[in-house]
Amino acid sequence: MRTITFEQIASAVEGLCIKANTQIGADVKEALEKAHAAEESPLGKTIIGHIMENNAIAENEMVPICQDTGMTVVFVTIGQEVFVEGGLTDAINEGVRRGYEKGYLRKSVVKDPLIRVNTGDNTPAVIHYDIVPGDKLHIMVAPKGFGSENMSQLKMFKPADGVEAIKKFVIEAVEKAGPNPCPPIVVGVGIGGTMEKASFLAKKALLRHIGHHSDKAHIAALEKELLEKINNLGIGPQGLGGRTTALAVNVETYPTHIAGLPCAVNINCHVARHSETEL
């Protein structure tokens, strides 16, 4: 059994919160550069250029990429041979508390969804745990802004509706979202499981590196088809027209019930923030 302390975890999460809000991933940078080179709309090209400039300033000056520094979503993969000294959930929330304070990140979480009093430290985080063999602890922090989160959709299809209904649903979800999620976007799609599993899969799909398709051939083909159709909508960068509405469409699947075909759509803005470490 390997022991990892409260302080190790809190310190790691603190750093991840700041990094995720000030630095975009190399895959996103590369996708934006390709989109900038390929964009046909002069206005769209200019907007992507401004986005790239904004990202560079944020990284160089260690300031948030966006004013919305998100609700902190944390994906934890914990080995069965790990013992956490001091409480894992408490350590993660302490790291969020420190990171948002130290990084001068906007605190965006309210204590009660109806009374709406700010918690003042961006806690609690939304934490997903996955238990695996081994003695490692992997933590991924993915701050989620709600301009894009509010565009999420879930639909419980019948199996007879089939893949064509899913394609129509995903494309219509992006069309309805329009400029609200700050395109160019990353589209996460979850298919299968139950209602909540499909939503989790859609969120998890956002974290896949841009350019990496599913290892299932029929799902990879679906991702490519959806990306092409979404970019043909003409929404464009920031919704002002162009061919770059999405940088990627990532689809995750899971076995489901014989009577159901759940499908969820979760959208990320172009920042697609996440940062990870392993202890």
Image (cartoon, rainbow, N blue to C red):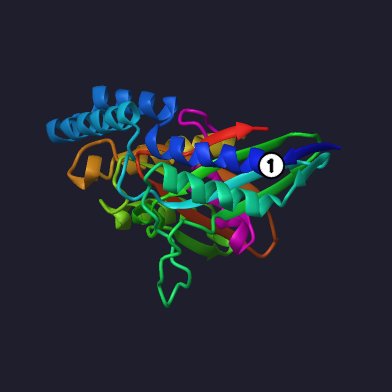
The residue that mark 1 highlights is 77
As drawn, the residue found furthest toward the bottom would be 115
Q: Tell me if residue 205 is in the magenta stretch.
A: yes
In the depicted structure, whether residue 79 falls above or below residue 72: above
Percent x, y for residue 178?
27, 53
Q: Is residue 229 visible?
A: yes
In the displayed structure, does residue 226 sit left or right of residue 237?
Answer: right
Residue at x 54%, y 59% (from the top left corner): 124
Determine whether 153 is above or below 186 in the image: below
How packed mark 1 is, by other alpha carbons closer than 10 Å (few <14, some 14-19, many 20 or more), is some
Viewer can see residue 189: no
The image quadrant where one finds the C terminus is top right
Write the residue at 27% across / 45% down. 233
Vertical comparison of 218 with 170: above or below: above
> Residue lying farthest right?
1
Q: Which residue does the image show at 54% across and 63% down from the upper left?
A: 157
Residue 144 appears at what percent x and percent y? 44, 50
Tell me where residue 249 sits by quadrant.
top left
What's the magenta region?
A: 187-215
- 202 and 73: which one is in front? 73
Please identify the quarter of the rendering in which residue 258 is found.
bottom right
Please tell me whether mark 1 sits on a helix, a strand or a loop.
Answer: strand
